[in-house]
Amino acid sequence: MESLDNKGLSRRSFLKGTGAGMGILASSMPSLAFENVFNNHNGAVATGQLKNAGLLEQTQTNSLFTQLTTALNFKQSKGEKVLVVLGQVSTQAFPHSVDHKLVSACLAHLLEKGCNSQDIAIAYHAPNTLASNSPLVRAIAPPEEDSRLHKAQLVNVANSDAWLTVEMPKSLPKVKILEQAQSADHIIFLDQLTDKHGSINCPLKGLAKVLFDSQSFSKYSNQYEDLFNMNEIHNAISKKVRLLAYNTSRFIAKSNGSDVQIHHVHPGMLAISNDVKSHQLFAENYLHSVLNTTPESKYSAQELTWFQSGVSRDPMTIAHIEKTIRKSGASLSKLELV
């Protein structure tokens, strides 16, 4: 992600939000502003309509993934390492897990662009290692006639000991990050729009669950955004997050009561972003426009470019998305992809 200079996060305000920092703060030196905090107020989202075309849906997802990532100007050179991070993962298929078609499309695109399978790592966090017959593992497995993916590394970080310690600024606890995140040149995050409770998935929370050792990360409580903004973590992880993607042809939504239900959207939408905040902003407004509810977004002073491919059979939904995004305070510019 590109970064813009902005006011630094003070050491005092950061420590006040962490359990470990409360005791440290009392005896610490007077607060100094960090000059190493980045902030990004410019991002883009590229979307394409999925026609839910049965057996052709994988082919269509592959084509859209390539078109949308090209629109976002994502490029990787031969020999560069790519870490694909999977958000919501379980033995159940989409929408209870990341869409296996999206994972397959991402890997196919990387291979098509010349990325060597030895330079691809796929990381996720789950209590148990995914079974070989689960939809996600089958999507990652290479076809018999294509050996390029045989050495792509699949890592369940819950069972991993490949952590690197990152020294944080004075008085802040050290953080352990995934070794593959440190060595990667690019990080791609694939997730489901909502979690199993029907709440919008937070991309920073999803990334943190996989990229940080849970024990060291617990010292920072829920300070996802503050931690990702620190210069040490920015250099090791944040600036490498090039793409974030989700499929909305189906998602889990809250019902009127305490139950949740699977929500089907026809046609569905594949959404890809080059910026965490833009990803969150668009996802929130898309979800609320479909469910006809009012979003409450914390991101307001943002410029968002929307690349749209395909014409929805429900133009009112598209109009509603534009309206709710503008209501959020974002400056929206829309470009049609041919």
Image: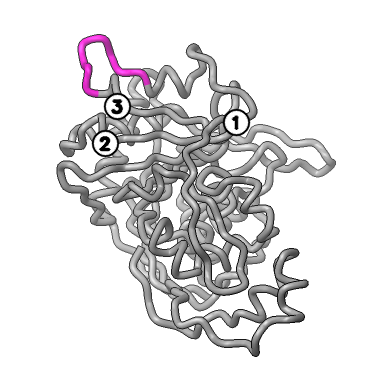
Residues 56 and 204: in front is 204
- Considering the whole magenta stretch, tell me its main secondary structure: loop
Which badge, 2 or 1, comes first in the chain's sequence?
2
Query: Under tag 2, what secondary structure?
Result: helix
Q: CA distance from mark 3 to mark 2?
A: 24 Å
Vertical position of residue 208 compared to residue 247: above or below: below
Query: Label 2 sits on what residue type?
Result: Asp
Q: CA distance from mark 3 to mark 1?
A: 29 Å
Residue ID at (22%, 17%): 147
Vertical position of residue 70 compared to residue 25: above or below: above
Question: Looking at the image, which residue sits at the far right?
Answer: 257
Query: Label 3 sits on what residue type?
Result: Thr
Can residue 334 be seen? yes
Query: Under tag 3, what secondary structure?
Result: helix
User: Which disc is residue 126 wearing?
Assistant: 1
Which badge, 3 or 2, comes first in the chain's sequence?
3
Q: Position of residue 139 (x, y in %)?
A: 40, 22
- Residue numbers of the magenta segment: 141-148
Do the residues under discs 2 and 1 have CB atoms within 8 angstroms? Answer: no
Vertical position of residue 223 compared to residue 76: above or below: below
Do the residues under discs 3 and 2 have CB atoms within 8 angstroms? Answer: no
Residue ID at (26%, 30%): 118
Disc 3 vs disc 1: which is toward the camera?
1
Residue designated by label 2 = 119
Callout count: 3
**From the viewer's perspective, is 216 left or right of 52?**
right
Query: Under tag 1, what secondary structure?
Result: loop
Task: Place residue 85 in its image quadrant.
Answer: top left
Query: Label 1 sits on what residue type?
Result: Ala
Q: Position of residue 55 (x, y in %)?
A: 37, 18
The quadrant of the rendering that contains the N terminus is bottom left
